[in-house]
Image (cartoon, rainbow, N blue to C red):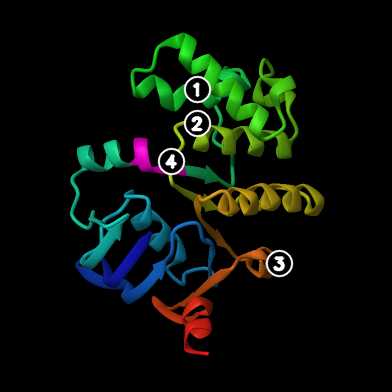
Amino acid sequence: MIQITNVIKDYTLASQVYRVLNGITFTIPEGMLAAIVGPSGSGKTTLLNILGGLDSPTAGEYLLNGRDVSHFDPDEWAHERNHTIGFVFQSFQLIPSLSARDNVALPLVYRGVPARIRRIQADEGLERVGLGHRKHHRPAQLSGGQQQRVAIARALVGDPPVLLADEPTGNLDHATGLEILEILRQLSEQGKTVVIVTHSAEVAQVCRQVIEVQDGHIVTNTLEMEQKV
């Protein structure tokens, strides 16, 4: 479960303080498929960075699976990300010189997993996203949709409970984007907490919880609206 309470994020540029997030509060339950939406500059990317430990809140509290991670140092966050959070990016961020198998296995290298076990788990991950037959192909030999499937397999290889996806369908055609979205939906049904940052209304409509951010504030949260009914 993700619980954010009164989170504020300020940036200082040329002695000027800019408030990007202003008292953000929400809860994303375990196993939820949630979307964070908002226009460019609304603060949604900053919020995603805080959720993934790539940035720290200026003030407020962040509980991840019941643990206060608000003020983790970089080493603590590196450990947390390697065991708790998987990332999927719009630009895939695969290493061109590595095969699909080796790209998927890369997070396991940092955990000290033996090579034989890495290969087995990477192959299982690729099978999970329907790419077992492409494990020896490099990114340039794969379509955009296939590359995103590899990226999802990489994010899942350590079986993290939380998956953060930054515009995961943004570089894909409509049909392929729907296929990727269906994979993410199925993962949430299997118990993963999946959070998607998107500007796409179509993507948001598939999600069970939609958190809309504007000018650093939450303007709507469909989960809260449901609870009030």
Q: Identify the residue under disc 3.
A: 202
Question: Callout 4: 10 Å neighbours few (<14), some, many (20+)?
Answer: some
Residue 222 — which label? none
Name the front one of labels 2 and 1.
2
Question: Callout 2: 10 Å neighbours few (<14), some, many (20+)?
Answer: many
Instruction: Say which label, 3 or 1, has the lower sequence index.
Output: 1
Based on the displayed image, in which of its 4 quarters is residue 50 positioned? bottom left
Q: How many marks?
A: 4
Tell me the amino acid under the disc marked 2.
Val
The magenta segment: 81-86
Q: SS of the residue at dot 2?
A: loop
Q: Residue at x 51, y 37 (%)?
A: 156
How many angstroms separate mark 3 from mark 2 (CA)?
28 Å
Q: Identify the residue under disc 2.
A: 157
Q: Are marks 2 and 4 in contact (CB under 8 Å)?
A: no
How many angstroms separate mark 2 from mark 4 (CA)?
8 Å
Q: Main secondary structure of the magenta part?
A: helix
Q: Position of residue 35 (x, y in %)?
A: 55, 65
Q: Quadrant of the N terminus?
A: bottom left
Residue 105 — which label? 1
Q: Position of residue 66 (x, y in %)?
A: 27, 57
Name the front one of labels 4 and 3.
4
How many angstroms separate mark 4 from mark 3 (CA)?
26 Å
Residue 160 — which label? 4
Q: Position of residue 4 (x, y in %)?
A: 32, 67
